[in-house]
Image: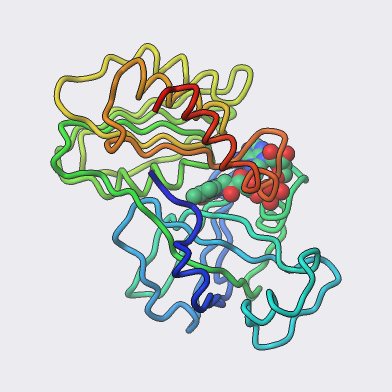
Amino acid sequence: MSNPNPAPSEGRRSPQARSAEVLRVERVTPHLIRVVLGGPGLAGFPAGQYADHYIKMLFPRPGVAYPEPFDIARIRAEFPRSEQPVVRTYTVRRWDAETGELTVDVVYHGAEGVAGPWAYAVQPGAVVHFMGPGGAYAPDPAAAWHLFAGDESALPAIAASLEMLPPGAHAYAFVEVADPAEEQALKSAGAVTLTWLHRTGRVGDALMAALRDFTFPDGDGDAFVHGEAGFVKEARRLLLVERAMPRERVSISGYWRLGQDEDGWQSTKRDFNQQMEAEHGL
Ligand SMILES: Cc1cc2nc3c(=O)[nH]c(=O)nc-3n(C[C@H](O)[C@H](O)[C@H](O)COP(=O)(O)OP(=O)(O)OC[C@H]3O[C@@H](n4cnc5c(N)ncnc54)[C@H](O)[C@@H]3O)c2cc1C
């Protein structure tokens, strides 16, 4: 399962933030904003192993000036919690070690929030600080088939996963987006059956309907299912309890929670997961 929090050893020993510059901003679709980062701060960025690599972006609190150079350990030691940077998690959509460019695809989900509005307004030249990368999932080349399911927040990781599939690998991808304008071209060497689902009611409803109708192929598959936490909980029951997929073959977690911002979700996630596991009996 993908672990969106850095390992304690990584985080506590000497948390080092990287600094990068916004090189380009592109509208992939009306609500998906691609931000390409670069600069010397990305030298040696250790991504590539996982399809779900993520970074923890650090956004300054309005009205708070941090000492230069940006030193997150010092900020955490010296600033009250209410003045510390706001943390938001984003998938590494692409890391190009040759050009030194790191791409994140940010969902613009309206004027609410920190990262979405930031991406909407950001211009080339802006400086970004972040921690990471973390990551845990890569498609198992030995799997008989792969299942991917998620909403827009998981689309960058699903897209990166499809790009990582070996030639001919059988994959079934279900992506729920608001409407047809949010669909985008995805690349893969695999034999991918990609189904775009358009939101009907609550986020994840269309995904659940599609997953319930999905005929699981024979053989040992693996699954990557992420997105809104309420949907993820239902999908987890379907995959692990009803379809009895082995736990270790399923990467599944809530990337965000309806009605909560990321701070709220991250602070309640452990309890949410414990309760979910108790309800599912595993
Ligand atoms: C490992 C990991 C990887 C992720 N990768 C990506 C990624 O590549 N791209 C991406 O866009 N997101 C990604 N997310 C999700 C992202 O971190 C959250 O959506 C985050 O809450 C967005 O921050 P914000 O400041 O825009 O909104 P917040 O301030 O956190 O939230 C404000 C309000 O918006 C709602 N909200 C948050 N996200 C969404 C959404 N996607 N759609 C509709 N409403 C929303 C909240 O429930 C809240 O009511 C990832 C999360 C994790 C844990």
- Give the camera-side residue of 4 and 92: 4
Query: Measuring 63% from the left and 17% from the top, which residue is drawn there?
Result: 201
Residue 87 drawn at (x, y percent): 64, 60
- 178 or 203, which is in the foreground? 203
Q: Is residue 193 left or right of residue 149?
A: left
User: Residue extending furthest right?
Assistant: 63
Q: Write the residue at 64% across / 42% down.
A: 268
What is the residue that sits farthest to the top in this orientation? Answer: 213
- Tell me the quarter of the picture where residue 177 sits: top right
Q: On the image, which quarter does residue 74 sit in?
A: bottom right
Q: Residue at x 41, y 31 (%)?
A: 149
Q: How many marks?
A: 0
Quarter placement of the N terminus: top left
Location of ligand 1 given as a quarter of the image: top right
Kindly tell me whether residue 107 is visible in this rendering: no
Image position, residue 96 (x, y; %) = 36, 68
Query: In screen coordinates, is 79 left or right of 184?
Result: right
Q: Position of residue 139 (x, y in %)?
A: 26, 44
Q: Residue at x 40, y 59 (%)?
A: 94
Tell me the quadrant of the picture where the C terminus can be found.
top left
Q: Is residue 4 above or below residue 220?
A: below
Q: Percent x, y for residue 135?
A: 39, 56
> Residue 109: which quarter of the image?
top right
Q: Is residue 59 left or right of residue 226?
A: right
Closer to the camera in the image, 25 or 204:
204
- Res 250 visible: yes
